[in-house]
């Protein structure tokens, strides 16, 4: 994917890593898309060493793959890996919901319940990107409400790969209603203070 935007100033390779994580999670770079060092140095205004450092970190996280003499590409997930991620995601989000039901304040729970409306609207409009962004807000509030920063950090590390899977699954029109039902069950349990 060629980048035709003006250079963005980034202070360090860590900032570039975070920007690339967000761009991949948003779908700006599709699975298999090549990440060209020269384009990244021009866009982000940092040297090749910083770009290479950022790419090595993203490869270590499983977000991209580095191939000698071929460069970096956004990693595509196979079916088994996607299934594994969904299983892990389900357990971690279930734990977050249990903790939120017990630890969350009434105000946090109401804000969390209200965060389902933008998800519902985006799914109704058939806008996958808006659904993912609204879903990110929903899950961020869920994780915040859990009161467990370690859990939040673990899920954050999986975020990009989970977003890739969610983008594909939400593209199937029949998944929208199933997704809403699942999210509504989470909201209902948290509001009821039911950790089960």
Image (tube, helix red, strand yellow):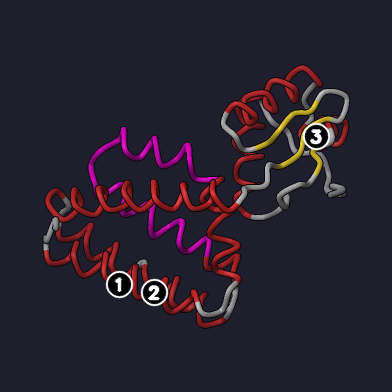
Relative to 123, say whether 31 is above or below: above
Residue position marked by numbered label 3 in the rendering: 40
Task: Give the labeled residue for mark 2.
Answer: 180
Percent position (x, y) of residue 148?
25, 38
Q: Give me the residue at 83% from left, 44% from top.
A: 6
Q: Position of residue 155 (x, y in %)?
A: 41, 42
Q: Position of residue 82 (x, y in %)?
A: 53, 51
**3D distance between C-alphas at marks 1 and 3:** 40 Å
Sequence-first disc among 2 and 3: 3
Q: Is residue 38 left or right of 27 when viewed as pictured? A: right
Q: What residue range appears in magenta?
A: 132-160
Instruction: Classify 195 as above or below 44.
Output: below
Residue drawn at x 43%, y 79% as measured from the top left: 177
- Give the camera-side residue of 19 and 175: 175
- Residue 137 seen in the current view: yes
Main SS of residues in magenta? helix
**Residue 127 sits in which quadrant?**
bottom right
Crowding around mark 3 (Cα neighbors within 10 Å: few <14, some 14 to 19, many 20+) is many
User: On the image, numbered disc 1 is attached to which residue?
Assistant: 184
Q: Is residue 140 magenta?
A: yes
């Amino acid at each position: 994917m060629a980048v035709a935007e003006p250079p963005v100033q980034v202070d360090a390779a860590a900032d570039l890593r975070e920007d690339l994580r967000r761009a991949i999670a948003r779908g700006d770079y599709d699975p298999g898309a090549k990440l060209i060092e020269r384009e990244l140095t021009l866009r982000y205004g940092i040297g090749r060493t910083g770009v290479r450092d950022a790419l090595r970190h993203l490869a270590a996280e499983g977000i991209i793959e580095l191939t000698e003499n071929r460069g970096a590409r956004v990693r595509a997930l196979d079916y088994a890996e996607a299934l594994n991620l969904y299983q892990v995601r389900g357990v971690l989000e279930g734990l977050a919901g249990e903790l939120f039901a017990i630890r969350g304040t009434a105000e946090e729970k109401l804000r969390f319940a209200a965060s389902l409306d933008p998800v519902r609207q985006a799914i109704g409009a058939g806008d996958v990107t808006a659904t993912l962004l609204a879903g990110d807000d929903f899950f961020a509030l869920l994780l915040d409400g859990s009161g467990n920063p370690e859990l939040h950090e673990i899920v954050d590390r999986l975020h990009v790969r989970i977003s890739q899977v969610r983008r594909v699954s939400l593209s199937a029109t029949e998944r929208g209603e199933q997704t809403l039902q699942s999210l509504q069950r989470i909201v209902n349990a948290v509001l009821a203070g039911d950790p089960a």
